[in-house]
Image: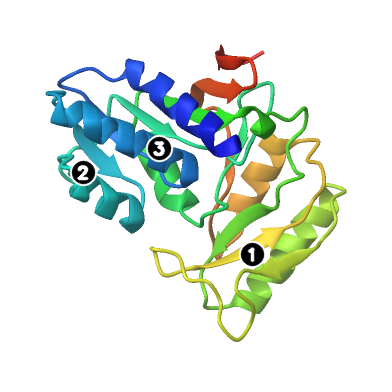
Amino acid sequence: MSDDWKRLAAEAALQEVRSGMKIGIGTGSTAEHFVRALGKAVADGLDVIGVPTSERTAALARDLGIRLATLEDLPVLDLTIDGADEIDPQLRLIKGGGGAHLREKIVAAASGTLIVIADHTKLVPVLGKFPLPVEVVPFGLGATRKAIETVLTRHGLPAALTLRGGNDHPFVTDGGHYILDAALGAIPDPDGLAADLVAIPGVVEHGLFIGLAGKAYVAGPEGVRVVTAA
Protein backbone atom coordinates (compact mmCIF):
# COMPACT_ATOMS: atom_id res chain seq x y z
CA MET A 1 0.00 0.00 0.00
CA SER A 2 2.86 2.41 0.79
CA ASP A 3 4.14 2.10 -2.77
CA ASP A 4 0.67 2.94 -4.08
CA TRP A 5 0.63 6.06 -1.91
CA LYS A 6 4.03 7.08 -3.21
CA ARG A 7 2.79 6.69 -6.77
CA LEU A 8 -0.35 8.73 -6.08
CA ALA A 9 1.66 11.56 -4.52
CA ALA A 10 4.09 11.56 -7.44
CA GLU A 11 1.34 11.62 -10.04
CA ALA A 12 -0.49 14.43 -8.21
CA ALA A 13 2.65 16.59 -8.18
CA LEU A 14 2.87 16.34 -11.95
CA GLN A 15 0.21 19.08 -12.13
CA GLU A 16 2.93 21.51 -11.04
CA VAL A 17 4.85 20.92 -14.27
CA ARG A 18 4.18 22.95 -17.42
CA SER A 19 5.68 22.79 -20.90
CA GLY A 20 8.78 24.90 -21.18
CA MET A 21 9.85 24.32 -17.59
CA LYS A 22 13.33 23.42 -16.41
CA ILE A 23 12.91 21.01 -13.53
CA GLY A 24 15.07 19.20 -11.02
CA ILE A 25 14.28 15.51 -10.77
CA GLY A 26 14.82 13.79 -7.44
CA THR A 27 16.13 10.43 -6.34
CA GLY A 28 14.56 7.54 -4.44
CA SER A 29 11.59 5.22 -4.62
CA THR A 30 8.96 7.99 -4.61
CA ALA A 31 10.90 10.10 -7.08
CA GLU A 32 11.10 7.12 -9.42
CA HIS A 33 7.30 7.11 -9.58
CA PHE A 34 7.47 10.77 -10.56
CA VAL A 35 10.04 10.07 -13.27
CA ARG A 36 7.80 7.39 -14.74
CA ALA A 37 4.78 9.70 -14.68
CA LEU A 38 6.85 12.47 -16.24
CA GLY A 39 8.05 10.10 -18.93
CA LYS A 40 4.46 9.30 -19.90
CA ALA A 41 3.61 13.00 -20.01
CA VAL A 42 6.65 13.70 -22.19
CA ALA A 43 5.57 10.92 -24.55
CA ASP A 44 2.19 12.68 -24.75
CA GLY A 45 3.79 15.98 -25.71
CA LEU A 46 4.93 17.70 -22.51
CA ASP A 47 8.09 19.69 -23.32
CA VAL A 48 10.46 19.96 -20.36
CA ILE A 49 14.15 19.66 -19.59
CA GLY A 50 15.21 17.83 -16.46
CA VAL A 51 18.27 18.03 -14.25
CA PRO A 52 18.66 14.69 -12.42
CA THR A 53 20.00 14.48 -8.88
CA SER A 54 21.72 11.10 -9.28
CA GLU A 55 23.14 8.76 -11.88
CA ARG A 56 20.30 6.34 -11.18
CA THR A 57 17.66 8.99 -11.87
CA ALA A 58 19.50 10.09 -14.99
CA ALA A 59 19.55 6.55 -16.39
CA LEU A 60 15.82 6.04 -15.80
CA ALA A 61 14.94 9.43 -17.28
CA ARG A 62 16.96 8.74 -20.41
CA ASP A 63 15.26 5.39 -20.84
CA LEU A 64 11.90 7.17 -20.70
CA GLY A 65 12.84 9.80 -23.27
CA ILE A 66 13.09 12.78 -20.93
CA ARG A 67 15.49 15.46 -22.13
CA LEU A 68 18.27 16.06 -19.62
CA ALA A 69 20.77 18.79 -18.88
CA THR A 70 23.13 19.80 -16.07
CA LEU A 71 23.32 22.83 -13.80
CA GLU A 72 26.21 24.00 -15.96
CA ASP A 73 23.74 24.22 -18.85
CA LEU A 74 20.77 25.39 -16.75
CA PRO A 75 21.97 27.07 -13.54
CA VAL A 76 18.46 28.26 -12.62
CA LEU A 77 15.51 25.86 -12.49
CA ASP A 78 11.79 26.48 -12.18
CA LEU A 79 11.21 23.78 -9.58
CA THR A 80 12.44 20.49 -8.23
CA ILE A 81 10.24 17.55 -7.32
CA ASP A 82 11.75 15.05 -4.90
CA GLY A 83 10.91 12.71 -2.05
CA ALA A 84 11.87 12.92 1.62
CA ASP A 85 12.59 10.57 4.49
CA GLU A 86 10.96 12.84 7.07
CA ILE A 87 8.85 16.02 6.89
CA ASP A 88 8.09 18.18 9.93
CA PRO A 89 5.27 20.78 10.30
CA GLN A 90 7.57 23.59 9.06
CA LEU A 91 8.42 21.55 5.93
CA ARG A 92 11.94 20.97 7.19
CA LEU A 93 13.17 17.66 5.86
CA ILE A 94 15.55 14.81 6.43
CA LYS A 95 16.75 13.42 3.12
CA GLY A 96 19.58 11.15 2.12
CA GLY A 97 18.41 7.62 2.80
CA GLY A 98 19.55 6.83 -0.73
CA GLY A 99 22.82 8.72 -0.36
CA ALA A 100 22.10 11.44 -2.96
CA HIS A 101 21.33 14.36 -0.63
CA LEU A 102 24.32 16.49 -1.71
CA ARG A 103 23.23 16.60 -5.33
CA GLU A 104 19.59 16.80 -4.25
CA LYS A 105 20.32 19.89 -2.14
CA ILE A 106 22.38 21.57 -4.87
CA VAL A 107 19.58 21.08 -7.39
CA ALA A 108 16.87 22.13 -4.93
CA ALA A 109 18.79 25.31 -4.03
CA ALA A 110 19.02 26.20 -7.73
CA SER A 111 15.25 25.94 -8.08
CA GLY A 112 12.45 28.42 -7.55
CA THR A 113 10.89 25.94 -5.14
CA LEU A 114 11.22 22.37 -3.92
CA ILE A 115 8.03 20.32 -4.04
CA VAL A 116 8.10 17.22 -1.89
CA ILE A 117 6.27 13.98 -2.68
CA ALA A 118 5.73 11.39 0.02
CA ASP A 119 3.39 8.93 1.67
CA HIS A 120 1.80 10.02 4.94
CA THR A 121 4.18 7.99 7.11
CA LYS A 122 6.92 10.54 6.33
CA LEU A 123 5.08 13.28 8.27
CA VAL A 124 6.56 13.61 11.76
CA PRO A 125 6.09 16.11 14.61
CA VAL A 126 9.86 16.31 15.19
CA LEU A 127 12.70 15.34 12.86
CA GLY A 128 15.24 12.74 13.91
CA LYS A 129 13.77 9.26 14.11
CA PHE A 130 15.18 8.59 10.64
CA PRO A 131 18.99 8.55 10.84
CA LEU A 132 20.52 11.83 9.69
CA PRO A 133 23.09 11.31 6.92
CA VAL A 134 26.23 13.43 7.05
CA GLU A 135 28.33 13.32 3.89
CA VAL A 136 32.06 13.56 4.60
CA VAL A 137 35.37 13.61 2.74
CA PRO A 138 37.22 10.29 3.17
CA PHE A 139 40.46 12.12 4.03
CA GLY A 140 40.67 12.80 7.75
CA LEU A 141 37.61 10.70 8.51
CA GLY A 142 38.56 10.10 12.12
CA ALA A 143 39.00 13.80 12.87
CA THR A 144 35.79 14.72 11.08
CA ARG A 145 33.89 12.04 12.95
CA LYS A 146 35.19 13.37 16.28
CA ALA A 147 34.15 16.91 15.36
CA ILE A 148 30.65 15.74 14.44
CA GLU A 149 30.36 13.88 17.73
CA THR A 150 31.34 17.07 19.58
CA VAL A 151 28.63 19.05 17.78
CA LEU A 152 26.00 16.41 18.51
CA THR A 153 26.95 16.34 22.19
CA ARG A 154 26.73 20.14 22.35
CA HIS A 155 23.17 19.89 21.02
CA GLY A 156 22.29 17.33 23.67
CA LEU A 157 22.07 14.56 21.07
CA PRO A 158 23.57 11.06 21.16
CA ALA A 159 26.94 10.87 19.42
CA ALA A 160 25.97 7.62 17.68
CA LEU A 161 27.55 7.60 14.22
CA THR A 162 27.70 4.67 11.81
CA LEU A 163 29.81 4.62 8.67
CA ARG A 164 27.39 3.54 5.95
CA GLY A 165 28.53 0.26 4.44
CA GLY A 166 31.02 -0.41 7.24
CA ASN A 167 34.76 0.10 7.50
CA ASP A 168 35.65 -2.66 5.03
CA HIS A 169 33.26 -1.60 2.25
CA PRO A 170 32.06 1.96 2.89
CA PHE A 171 29.26 3.29 0.72
CA VAL A 172 30.60 5.84 -1.76
CA THR A 173 28.31 8.62 -2.99
CA ASP A 174 28.09 9.86 -6.58
CA GLY A 175 30.45 12.63 -5.47
CA GLY A 176 33.05 10.18 -4.16
CA HIS A 177 32.37 10.79 -0.46
CA TYR A 178 31.42 8.69 2.56
CA ILE A 179 28.29 8.96 4.72
CA LEU A 180 28.09 8.89 8.49
CA ASP A 181 24.55 8.14 9.66
CA ALA A 182 23.58 9.73 12.97
CA ALA A 183 20.90 7.95 15.03
CA LEU A 184 19.52 10.92 16.97
CA GLY A 185 15.96 9.99 17.94
CA ALA A 186 14.74 13.61 17.90
CA ILE A 187 16.31 16.91 16.82
CA PRO A 188 15.02 19.82 18.93
CA ASP A 189 16.89 22.49 16.93
CA PRO A 190 17.25 21.41 13.28
CA ASP A 191 18.27 24.90 12.13
CA GLY A 192 21.10 25.20 14.63
CA LEU A 193 22.32 21.67 14.08
CA ALA A 194 22.34 22.17 10.31
CA ALA A 195 24.51 25.28 10.61
CA ASP A 196 26.94 23.70 13.07
CA LEU A 197 27.42 20.53 11.04
CA VAL A 198 28.15 22.24 7.74
CA ALA A 199 30.74 24.45 9.48
CA ILE A 200 32.92 21.40 10.21
CA PRO A 201 35.90 21.00 7.84
CA GLY A 202 35.49 17.61 6.23
CA VAL A 203 31.69 17.72 6.22
CA VAL A 204 30.49 18.17 2.65
CA GLU A 205 26.76 18.35 3.42
CA HIS A 206 24.08 16.83 5.62
CA GLY A 207 20.55 15.59 5.12
CA LEU A 208 18.73 18.46 6.87
CA PHE A 209 16.87 20.49 4.24
CA ILE A 210 15.90 23.80 5.85
CA GLY A 211 13.89 26.52 4.09
CA LEU A 212 13.87 24.80 0.72
CA ALA A 213 10.48 23.05 0.47
CA GLY A 214 7.49 25.11 -0.59
CA LYS A 215 4.81 22.44 -0.39
CA ALA A 216 4.37 18.70 -0.16
CA TYR A 217 2.01 16.30 -1.89
CA VAL A 218 1.29 13.64 0.70
CA ALA A 219 -0.76 10.51 -0.02
CA GLY A 220 -2.44 8.16 2.44
CA PRO A 221 -5.63 6.21 3.09
CA GLU A 222 -7.75 9.31 2.51
CA GLY A 223 -6.10 10.27 -0.78
CA VAL A 224 -3.63 13.02 -1.64
CA ARG A 225 -3.43 16.32 0.21
CA VAL A 226 -1.23 19.36 -0.21
CA VAL A 227 0.75 20.30 2.89
CA THR A 228 2.26 23.74 3.45
CA ALA A 229 4.40 25.01 6.29
CA ALA A 230 2.62 25.56 9.61
Position of 44 relative to 36 (above/below): above
Task: Name the front one of labels 3 and 1.
Answer: 3
Mark 1 closeness class: few <14, some 14–19, many ≥20 residues within 10 Å: many
Q: Quadrant of residue 109?
A: top left
**Residue at which label 2 appears:** 64
Q: Residue furthest front?
A: 1
Q: Amino acid at mark 3?
A: His
Mark 2 or mark 1, which is nearer the start of the sequence? 2
**Disc 1 vs disc 2: which is toward the camera?**
2
Q: Does residue 138 appear anywhere in the picture?
A: yes
Q: Is residue 102 above or below residue 23?
A: below
Image quarter of residue 67: top left
Classify mark 2: residues with Cα within 10 Å, few (<14), some (14-19) or many (20+).
some
* Image-based side of 57 in relation to 222, left or right: left
Q: Are circles 1 and 2 on residues that touch, CB within 8 Å?
A: no
Left or right, 168 with reference to 109:
right
Measure the alpha-carbon separation of dots 3 and 1.
Answer: 28 Å
Residue 33 is labelled as 3
Amino acid bearing label 1: Leu
| Residue that appears at 62% across and 30% down | 92
| N-term-proximal mark, 3 vs 1 | 3
Mark linked to residue 180: 1
Q: Quadrant of the C terminus?
A: top right
Picture residue at 32% right of the left edge, 38% below the top:
35
Instruction: Look at the image and name its color scheme.
Output: rainbow
